[in-house]
Image (tube, helix red, strand yellow):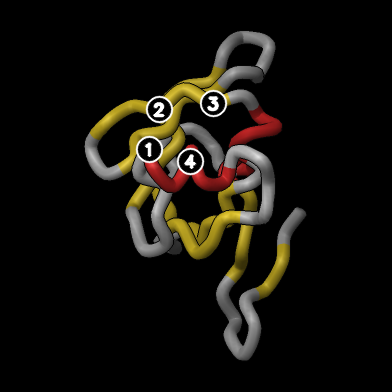
Amino acid sequence: MIKFAENSKSIILNASELHIGQNARITRLNDSPITHKLFEMGCVPGTKISLEFKSPAGDPIALDIDGYILGLRLSEAEIIQVEPEIG
């Protein structure tokens, strides 16, 4: 779901909505039982990420998070809100 950041014209997506090769910055993590675990694995607001791979069925996906690859289910990636880089 595309959202706009408060008081900004920035687009906010879930990490699950990125396209392969698309770069973004994490803006926040939604509340979830695994939010703390994602934070421990480097999903910290301000961190640069990009979508590297999708399985043929589309789930799971692999994100490059500040230089390492993290595999996630789409339901887990939906917890991560990002602001895509434009251009």
Q: Position of residue 14 (x, y in %)?
A: 63, 49
Pointers 2 and 4 in contact (C-beta within 8 Å): no
Decide which of tag 3 and tag 1 comes sooner along the chain. 1
Give me the residue at 64% from left, 46% from top: 79
Pointers 1 and 2 in contact (C-beta within 8 Å): yes
In the image, farthest residue toward the left? 67
Decide which of tag 2 and tag 4 comes sooner along the chain. 4
Marks 3, 1: nearer the viewer: 1
Q: Around disc 2, counting alpha carbons within 10 Å, would you say few (fewer than 14), some (14 to 19), or many (20 or more)?
A: some
Q: Position of residue 44 (x, y in %)?
A: 40, 55
Pointers 3 and 2 in contact (C-beta within 8 Å): yes
Of residues 71 and 41, the one nearer the viewer is 41
User: Which residue is tagged 2?
Assistant: 70
Q: Position of residue 72 (x, y in %)?
A: 54, 26
Mark 2 vs mark 4, CA separation in Å: 10 Å
Mark 1: which secondary structure? loop
Q: Around disc 3, counting alpha carbons within 10 Å, would you say few (fewer than 14), some (14 to 19), or many (20 or more)?
A: some
In the shown orientation, is residue 54 left or right of residue 78? Answer: left
Pointers 1 and 4 in contact (C-beta within 8 Å): yes
User: Which residue is tagged 4?
Assistant: 38
Q: Amino acid at mark 2?
A: Leu
Mark 1 vs mark 2, CA separation in Å: 8 Å
Mark 4: which secondary structure? helix
Q: Amino acid at mark 3?
A: Leu
Q: Which mark is on residue 72?
A: 3
In the image, farthest residue toward the right? 1
Decide which of tag 1 and tag 2 comes sooner along the chain. 1
